[in-house]
Amino acid sequence: MVNVSEGRRLKHIDAISDLLRTEQAVYVLHRDIGRDANRTVFTIVGIAREVFSSIERLYLYSMKHLDISKHQGSHPRIGIIDVVPFIPIKNITEEDLTLMVRAFSKRISASFEVPIFYYGMLSSNHQQKTLHDLRKRNLEESIGKTIFPDKGTSKPHPQLGASCITVRKFMGAYNINLSTSNLKDAKALAQRIRKSRNSSSAQDIDLSQVKFLGWYVEEYGCCQISTNIYDLSTVTLIELYRYVSKEAAAMSLAVMGSELIGMIPEAGIYKGSHSLDQVLEELGLDKVRSFDKKTQILDYKLEHLDWKTN
């Protein structure tokens, strides 16, 4: 998933889609456009060397047409090409992909003079382990002083800012809608969940790999509990939805469906005997925007790709 800090100008979003894809080598499986967040998540899949070339074209385009210093949006960010996680799917090991990503990061940082921060399993600095650790700081004030890029200069690029890169397993970007437009209530609920994650009430669910944030989305007219699930093998969407529902009810709030950003493997949605359609209905993934299981569940898309074999 390539996270780009542009979600309002369709001409740029379309241009990026076009430059990312190549015939039978890189496919743009899905793009998730958030106007209030001013952010688009492009889910791409392809042959590794071709994927690196596509993203390199994205840096070149962004340097010419986009500018982080003029960016406004509700989503935290440190750059135009803000987050680029690489996920091994098949025919490549995590170890081999890691070596390739490190070499790619070195090349990108040198070519475009943009700082590259590793996060998650790629990070060797515990102070930079998560995206949250990086985003909570003022980049201009802290880079080269309290945080140091893994590759490149200790000065943000004037148009591009900086980028966060990792190799990881599948994760989920998932938001749960609340029956309130009061941001204080949403933030209080997020704080309650963070505090209660290790309590006896949460003993049947593993929230250790989930980050929670309460925010207001003007486009939807409601607040959400925004979550990043860093390892979908630890908790499914339905487990998380039910847990947040219970915690919201304790504050006299209700949940009103949810929103999936980008794509997700089916195993990250639920496990058990229920049918997929039953679970999707309970999650209410179409309450604030459209949802199509054939375009947003990874398993459906991968079945029909025609890969270049030479």
Image: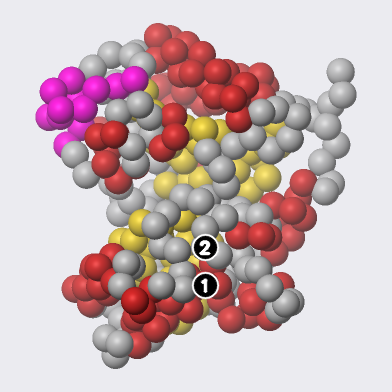
Measuring from the top left, give residue 232's x and y in whole percent.
Answer: 55, 55
Along the viewing direction, whichever of 9 and 90 lies nearer the viewer = 90
Which of the 4 quarters of the picture holds residue 250?
bottom left
**Which stretch did the figure color magenta?**
138-150
Quick check: 154 left or right of 278?
A: left
**What amino acid is at disc 2?**
Val
Is any part of residue 71 visible from this angle?
no
Q: Is residue 78 above or below residue 240?
A: above
Instruction: Please tell me whether mark 1 sits on a helix, a strand or a loop.
Output: helix
Q: Which residue is mark 1?
A: 239
Which of the 4 quarters of the picture holds residue 273?
bottom right
Q: Residue at x 82, y 48 (%)?
A: 303
Q: Residue at x 48, y 78 (%)?
A: 242
Q: Which mark is residue 235?
A: 2
Q: Which mark is residue 198?
A: none
Measuring from the top left, give residue 184's x and y in whole percent.
Answer: 19, 73
Along the viewing direction, whichever of 180 and 211 lies nearer the viewer = 211
Mark 1 closeness class: few <14, some 14–19, many ≥20 residues within 10 Å: some
Distance from the alpha carbon under mark 2 to that under mark 1: 6 Å
Along the viewing direction, whichever of 229 and 8 lies nearer the viewer = 229
Q: Residue at x 44, y 13 (%)?
A: 106
Q: Indicate whether residue 146 is drawn in magenta.
A: yes
Asked whether the residues under the numbered discs 2 and 1 touch, taking CB atoms below 8 Å apart as contact, a structural biologist would say yes
Along the viewing direction, whichever of 213 and 8 lies nearer the viewer = 213
Secondary structure mostly seen in the magenta stretch: loop
Q: Is residue 45 above or below residue 146?
A: below
